[in-house]
Every structure is written in C-alpha cells, then in structure tokens.
Amino acid sequence: MCSPMARRHRPLRAVSLVFAGFVTLVLLSQLSAHFFAEAIPKHLQAQNAAVISSIQQTSTDLAFAAAALGLVFAGAVLLITRQRVAADVDVYRATGLQSSSAFLRLLRSHSLAPLAWVAGAAAATALVDVDFGLNALFPIGLAVSFACLLVAWLAFVTSVSFSRKGFEGGSGGRAG
Amino acid sequence: MTTPAAEAAIAAIVFDSVTKAYSSKAESVKALDGVSFSVEKGGIVAVVGPSGSGKTTLLNMAAALDFPTQGTVKVAGVVTSSLGKEDLQKFRNETVGVVFQQFFLISHMTVFQNVMIPLIPRHLSSAEKTKRILQSIADVGLADKAGRLPSELSGGELQRAAIARGMVGDAPVILADEPTGNLDHKRGSEVMDTLVEESRERGKTVLIATHDLRLLDRVDGVVYLEDGKITKFEGRRVLTNGA
C-alpha cells in the first residue's frame, strides 16, 4: 500500500539509533583495549602487566563515560520527542482506544532493531573471547537498560495523556 | 419556544447551563460560562467566535474529552459526565467522530492505517474493516492515495483524510474543530463541501467550531460565542434551551 518514495518517520527511531551508537562506542572501547593488549608480544606481557592493566582500566572508564553519555542523550531525546508521541496517544484516546491498546501500538510502531543488533554483536564478541575479560555483559546490560527506559517512558506518556482532560495534540496549549 | 421534553426527543447534542472553569493559584478562568443550546438530529451547526472564546473547550466537552465544572452535556441521549471508563471509551469510539484543526494524522502511518484507527476496537471482520476504510477514503476523494503517508499529501488532502477518519466509524455525531483553519480559501471550501456533503448523505449531526465566517452559508445554524458566553443564535436546527 505504500508508495516507493514514502519514508516512514517512526517516532523515537532516532533515539534508538543515537543510543545504539553509544552502545557501539562502549563495545569498541572494550574491543580496542583487547586488541591493543593482544598486540603486545606474549614474552613481554609479564613485564608489562601494569601497562595492560592500565589500558584495561582506561577502557573501562571510557566505556562507563560513553554509557553515561548515551543515557543522558537518550533521556534528552525522549524529552524532546514527548510532544510528538503524546499527540499520537491523544489521537488514540480521542478515537476511543483503551490505554493498554494505545501503549501496545506505540511499542509496535517503535523500532528496536538497532538495539537488537548491538546486543547481538556484543553477545557474539563475548562468545569469541570470554577469557580475556571482555565484559560483553556491560554493553548488553546497557542496551537492555535503554529498552527498559524506553518502555517505561512510553508507559508514562500514555498514562499522563489518558488521565488528562481535553485534546491538545500533546501541545499543552489550549486553543479557541 | 420548544419544551424540554420535545428538545430531548429531537436534539442530538444538548448543552445545559455548562460552565467550565480552570483554576490556578492566581486566578480562576471560565472557558465556558453558563452555555445552553441544543443541536437537532441531522443538523449542521457552527460555533463561531474569536480565538480563546471557548470553541475548542465546547467541542472537547461534546467529545467527552473534557467535562463541565457545572451543568451537563448530553450527546445522543448520553450524559457524558456520567460515563464510566469503559463506557467512555465506547462513547468516544461509537458515538462521536472528531476532525481536528491540525489533522493529527499519525505521521508514520499511511492514510489507510490512519483511517483504520477508530475501527481497531470494533468487533468486525478484517474484510469488513477494509471495505469500510476504503469506502470512507473514496468518499473524500482520496481513493488513489490510500497508501500514501501524511508527508506526501497536501493540506487539503490531509484534512480530507482526517474527515475520512472521523466518518469511518459511522458515529451519529461529527465534531470538527476549525476544519479549514490551516487551509487557504479554495481548499477550505472544498474541505467544507466534503464535510457537509458526507454528513448530509449519512444523516449525521455536525458541530463545527470555526472563526471563518465565509463557511456559514453552508450550515443550518450558528451559535456565536465570546469569552465563554453565547451572544447570539442564528438559523435553524439550533435550539436555545430557553437562553
């Protein structure tokens, strides 16, 4: 039914993409520390234990920083897109849908594919190299945390919209 | 003068001494102040007034999206403020169809999918739903654009898609808030023609909020609103409830 030129601007897809970028950054910071340490010849590793440890520590610090930035950015984008999401919820409410039905439709309209890709990549990395101490649970946990944040946010916006009076298309304004 | 009993029998929409006040710490503002009028079944009535006069509040009340601080609103024989949660959703779905000024089509859905929204809670077969959706879209002249996204439509087409969504549920009462507000005069006239023709053909009762006085020759009656109060009635099919 959709014309070839049509592009679907799904709400919050940008949030997933931004956050997926940050989770990838976390993953890359861990991988870079891994490959840097691997590059040091075996017979020199014992003498450079302190250096390797320092690299791993820096990598972990970078990963935490990227994760924190990712959460802050994702939260900010969620706040910015609230009005658009609330407008969609208002349409569902005004046409007589139940709040649970509206919530499910919001979830279905939001693509979690970027997060699934990152979580999959992190899991694959962990399977390849578990004994180095590459903590794939970290980016996976981060992706899951973001998915939970997103679901909780959508539930909150739906709940607020359904408990509100009037129809303002999520604008908060009151016309005519 | 019509008696209350006679009014109840012929009126589709009844506002009875409706006041809506919004309170803040500093002040209390009355968006509607003692508004009383009725619209006959099958009538097309415009509510006219400047921005901020209470038109949208009045339509929100009729759509059961908001409720009076005092007085009652009765639509199709139902007092909106008496409805429980489930009945309220059923009322919004089956009794009223709403057309908004800014269209409020969901941007990532096609015209077909947007028009389908009011039918989601209905216990109809998929084939029946598809048939009704395509018919509604064809009725507003968008048959060849059912698969388009809102971003691919013009302003007039967006509003016609919104009208199709308001009509698809076959609700007896249609509420339109500034349906031509975002359109130029030519497109506004076309949209108004579509709304009026569709409503008359299907025997709908229509309440339109507008500040566009050029549209008034198409309606049966006019209620003039200013600062939340009715200042004048004109035409037929609008009853004054003794006001």
Image (cartoon, rainbow, N blue to C red):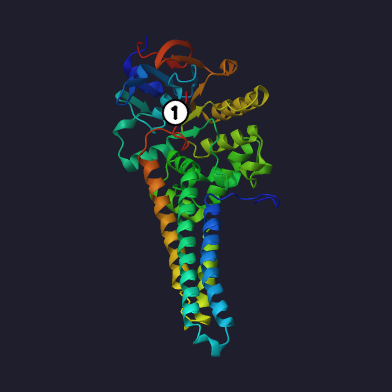
Residue for point 42% across, 29% down: B60
The answer to which of B134 and A12 lies nearer the viewer is: A12
Q: Quadrant of residue B62?
A: top left
Q: Residue furthest front?
A: A47
Residue A172 at what x, y percent from top left? 44, 34
Residue A18 as seen in the image, left or right of residue B83: right
Q: Position of residue B198 (x, y in %)?
A: 57, 30
Residue behind mark 1: A174
**Residue for point 50% across, 86% down:** A47
Amino acid carrying mark 1 in the image: Arg
Q: Is residue B222 above or below residue B205?
A: above
Say if B155 sits above or below A128 in the image. Answer: above
Task: Indicate left or right for B68 with B177 as reference.
Answer: left
In this view, the residue in front, B146 or A22, is: A22
Image location of residue B186, percent across then percent down? 68, 23
Toward which corner of the image does residue B53 lie, by quadrant?
A: top left
Q: In screen coordinates, is B27 left or right of A104?
A: left
Specify the subunit that label 1 lies on: A
Residue lying at the far bottom in this picture: please name it. A43
Query: Measured from the top left, where is residue B92 in percent x and y?
Result: 41, 37
The answer to whether residue A7 is seen in the rendering is yes
